[in-house]
Image (cartoon, rainbow, N blue to C red):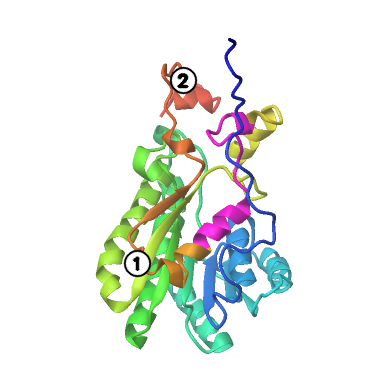
């Protein structure tokens, strides 16, 4: 008797765009602040908060992108009001002004904060200049801390509850060859989740992390985009245990759940949404290719 075929199917596709993962109106009357919310995954996350009735503040450094996103998010069915704020999160005074503007617009501080803004580019560690290191760490870690601190201080002073979601990266656990600056910064962001969950939990402030896998979108870094463009059309799927990449709305659903009333007892946790890709291990490891060679760089010269 011949062996029965068991074709690989991968994980099922998500529900269609426009579906909601939580009851309608879950965030009605609440304000959500999303940094880096004008494009890419930040906008995808903001979209799902809008769909559930939240008033939105999207912050970023480019007014043109913010204005376009503001118009798009305001047209989402179920959306509350949407405002945009130009902000360099490395500047704590500007961060404070964004919170002032949110309170002026909506009559209350943001109830939800999504720390999505970050910086990244591939580089061998030995080639990283002090300015290159600071450029990534100051946005990804220090900027995240400035926004988180402002959120926490306002809720502590008001005696009100709040929820924070920090967008992380799996190399916070594993290290990231070619991304020493970003991996170190994201490890710090993950540690903030675990530290502040304990410090601020008694005051009603929860904080969690959210790690995306491969979610193709317009904001991808050039190395990721270049790799996808060089691969065969379906090669990106075959490299995932799920046999597919993520849809940005799936990350949005995860973010809204972590910030919702249905996740109030979840804090200090980092949720990885990547179809198990970061946990892959080969039975026989491939040959090691140094990072310099992967990036097409010659021998190091001081």
Q: Give the range drawn in magenta.
A: 236-255
Q: Relative to the observer, which residue lies in front, 102 or 24?
A: 24
The mark total stands at: 2
Q: Quarter of the image holding residue 51?
A: bottom right
From the image, state whether disc 2 or disc 1 is nearer to you: 1
Q: Whole-percent x and y of residue 273?
A: 49, 48
Q: Residue 274 carries which label?
A: none
Q: Relative to the observer, which residue lies in front, 83 or 275?
A: 275
Q: Name which of mark 2 and mark 1 comes first in the sequence.
A: 1
The magenta stretch spans residue 130: no
163 sits to left or right of 200? right
Give the Cα distance between marks 2 and 1: 44 Å
Mark 1: give few (<14), some (14-19) or many (20+) Cα within 10 Å. Answer: few
Q: Is residue 90 visible in the rendered structure shown here?
A: no
Q: Residue 265 carries which label?
A: 1
- Which quadrant, please, contains the N terminus? top right
- Which quadrant, please, contains the C terminus? top left
Residue lying at 58% horizontally and 53% vertically, measured from the top left: 250
Dot 2 corresponds to which residue?
289
Q: In this view, does 134 lie above or below 245?
A: below
């Amino acid at each position: 008797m011949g062996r029965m075929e068991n074709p690989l199917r991968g994980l099922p596709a998500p529900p269609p765009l426009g579906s909601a993962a939580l009851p309608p109106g879950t965030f009605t009357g609440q304000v959500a602040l999303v940094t880096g919310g004008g494009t890419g995954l930040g906008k995808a996350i903001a979209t799902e908060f809008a769909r559930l009735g939240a008033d939105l503040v999207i912050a970023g450094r480019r007014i043109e992108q913010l204005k376009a996103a503001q118009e798009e998010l305001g047209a989402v069915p179920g959306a509350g009001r949407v405002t945009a704020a130009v902000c360099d999160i490395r500047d704590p005074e500007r961060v404070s002004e964004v919170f002032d503007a949110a309170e002026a617009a909506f009559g209350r501080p943001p109830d939800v904060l999504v720390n999505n803004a970050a910086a990244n580019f591939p580089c061998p560690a030995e080639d990283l200049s002090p300015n290159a290191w600071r450029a990534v760490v100051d946005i990804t870690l220090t900027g995240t801390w400035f926004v988180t601190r402002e959120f926490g201080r306002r809720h502590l002073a008001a005696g009100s509850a709040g929820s924070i979601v920090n967008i992380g990266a799996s190399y916070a656990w594993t290290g990231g060859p070619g991304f020493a600056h970003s991996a170190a910064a994201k490890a710090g962001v993950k540690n903030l989740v675990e530290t502040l969950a304990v410090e601020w939990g008694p005051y009603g402030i929860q904080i969690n992390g959210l790690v995306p896998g491969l979610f193709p979108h317009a904001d991808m870094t050039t190395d990721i985009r270049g790799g996808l463009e060089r691969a065969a059309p379906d090669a990106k799927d075959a490299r995932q245990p799920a046999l597919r990449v993520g849809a940005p709305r799936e990350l949005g659903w995860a973010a809204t759940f972590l910030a919702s009333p249905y996740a109030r007892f979840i804090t200090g946790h980092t949720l990885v949404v990547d179809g198990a890709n970061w946990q892959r291990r080969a039975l026989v490891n491939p040959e090691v290719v140094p990072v310099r060679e992967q990036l097409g760089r010659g021998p190091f010269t001081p």
